[in-house]
Image (cartoon, rainbow, N blue to C red):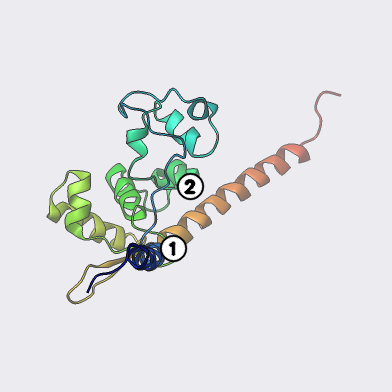
Amino acid sequence: MKRTAKKVRAAAGARTTISKKKKRRNTVAPQRAKDSVSANADQPSSSPAAKTGSGAHGLITRWGGHEVLARDGFVPVVVTYLKNAGQLKPHPLSPVETLFVLQLMVHKWDARAPHPSFKTLATRMGISLQYARRIARDLETKGYLRRRMRVGTTTRFDLTPLFAHLASHVQSIQQQHAQGESDINDEPDDLA
């Protein structure tokens, strides 16, 4: 049966709509720059928008203006995590554990626990599969990660304990700073 061009376009549009809904639900669309890609993507962008430092263009500008670097998207990371991961008490995160969490965040698109495979994590980090499993086990032992093993599919990595511990750590630091400031204000003026 022959289909008219109009019907083919309509069917393709319906598939695209369904595909977009699925993609939004199951994955995060990479955040991409809106400006046009230069003829040679390895060269810094010469578009005025890329130099402004605003929005997605600011991201590309910070990474040397190379649009190709943002092709796969980016991961929003709170600076608080980067500043405090190595100071968490009683168990600071090692640099490799910090990177492991960042790799998990690549797969965390909403409140649900990410579920990349250990093979994916190991490959991206340039480590062995056994070492990736050991890092997860260590994070679990420290109380920062809960692994939910699933039969026939990948493990879910629940980072909720880490986020709660990080928030508690930051609040503790803020209270210490506030207490320190009030102690300074309470001291008698010895200039008199």
Provide the residue designation for mark 1.
110
Q: Which of marks 2 and 1 is in front?
A: 1
The correct choice, above or below, for 120 with respect to 113 in the image is: above
Q: What amino acid does circle 1 point to?
A: Asp
SS class, disc 1: loop
Q: Count all numbered tags in the image, as a single digit.
A: 2
> What crowding class fits label 1: few (fewer than 14 Cα within 10 Å), some (14-19), or many (20 or more)?
few
Where in the figure is residue 184, as x and y percent of width and height? 72, 37
Q: What amino acid does circle 2 point to?
A: Val
Instruction: Work out whether residue 112 or residue 145 is closer to the camera in this orientation and state it.
Output: 112
Instruction: Work out whether residue 11 or residue 168 is closer to the camera in this orientation and state it.
Output: 11
Where in the figure is residue 124, as x and y percent of width and height? 22, 46
SS class, disc 2: loop
Distance from Cα at disc 2 to Cα at disc 1:
15 Å
Q: In which quarter of the image is the N terminus?
A: bottom left
Q: Which residue is drawn at 38% across and 66% down?
A: 10
Q: Quadrant of the C terminus?
A: top right
The correct choice, above or below, for 183 with respect to 9 in the image is: above
Q: Which residue is drawn at 51% across and 25% down?
A: 48
Q: Which residue is drawn at 16% across and 52% down?
A: 131
Where in the figure is residue 189, as x and y percent of width and height? 81, 30
Where in the figure is residue 69, as x and y percent of width and height? 33, 35
Q: Which residue is drawn at 37% across and 64% down?
A: 6
Instruction: Work out whether residue 68 or residue 133 is closer to the camera in this orientation and state it.
Output: 68
Provide the residue designation for mark 2.
78
Query: Which circle marks residue 152 in the picture?
Result: none
Q: Which residue lies furthest to the bottom in this view?
A: 151
The mark that comes first in sequence, 2 or 1, is 2
Q: Which residue lies furthest to the right in this view?
A: 192
